[in-house]
Image (cartoon, rainbow, N blue to C red):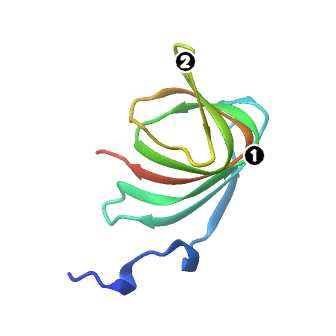
Amino acid sequence: MTILVKDIQHFSSSASQSEHYFLPEQKRLEGNPQQILTNHYSSGCRQFHVGIWQSAGGKWNVNYTEHEYCDILEGCSIICDTEGNSLTVAVGDKFVIPAGFIGTWEVIENCKKVYVIFEQK
């Protein structure tokens, strides 16, 4: 199968639909932030995904089964691990959260990020 230029997924011309949702109550720690997910690409094997995620302020539990690369486009968040260590991420920050990370994600200022996810089988 030959992949051509027409097969390249360009975010600005993507027809991807955005999913608006609220987190399940059992994950929420503070607030009830609306989140928006626009997945621009998923591989045929469904293990690799790329898109834009947005969230209003709030705090919730996270449990990563996937590896995720993040590029913060707007806002500020604090990511904490189970030992109380924290990382503040803001506009321009690029980082990877390895699969197996458990902790919390807190949006301080409405956050928008590019995500690239790999979910190992």
Percent x, y of residue 58: 74, 36
**Residue bearing mark 2:** 85
The local crowd at label 2, few if under 14, some if 14 to 19, many if 20 or more residues have their Cα within 10 Å, is few
Q: Tell me which residue sits at (45%, 29%) in the image.
A: 101
Q: Tell me which residue sits at (64%, 65%) in the image.
A: 18
Alpha-carbon span between mark 1 and mark 2: 23 Å
Q: Work out whether mark 1 precedes mark 2 in sequence or the reverse, and give the earlier one.
A: 1
Q: Tell me which residue sits at (54%, 77%) in the image.
A: 14
| The N terminus: image quadrant | bottom left
| The C terminus: image quadrant | top left
The local crowd at label 1, few if under 14, some if 14 to 19, many if 20 or more residues have their Cα within 10 Å, is some
Looking at the picture, does residue 17 appear above or below residue 58? below
Percent x, y of residue 33: 75, 43
**Residue bearing mark 1:** 56
Amino acid at pointer 1: Ala
The front one of 107 and 32 is 107
Amino acid at pointer 2: Asn
Q: Quick check: can you spot residue 86?
A: yes
Q: Is residue 51 left or right of residue 21?
A: left
Tag 1 near tag 2, CB within 8 Å: no
Identify the element where label 1 is drawn: loop
Percent x, y of residue 89: 60, 37
Residue 49 location, quadrant: bottom left
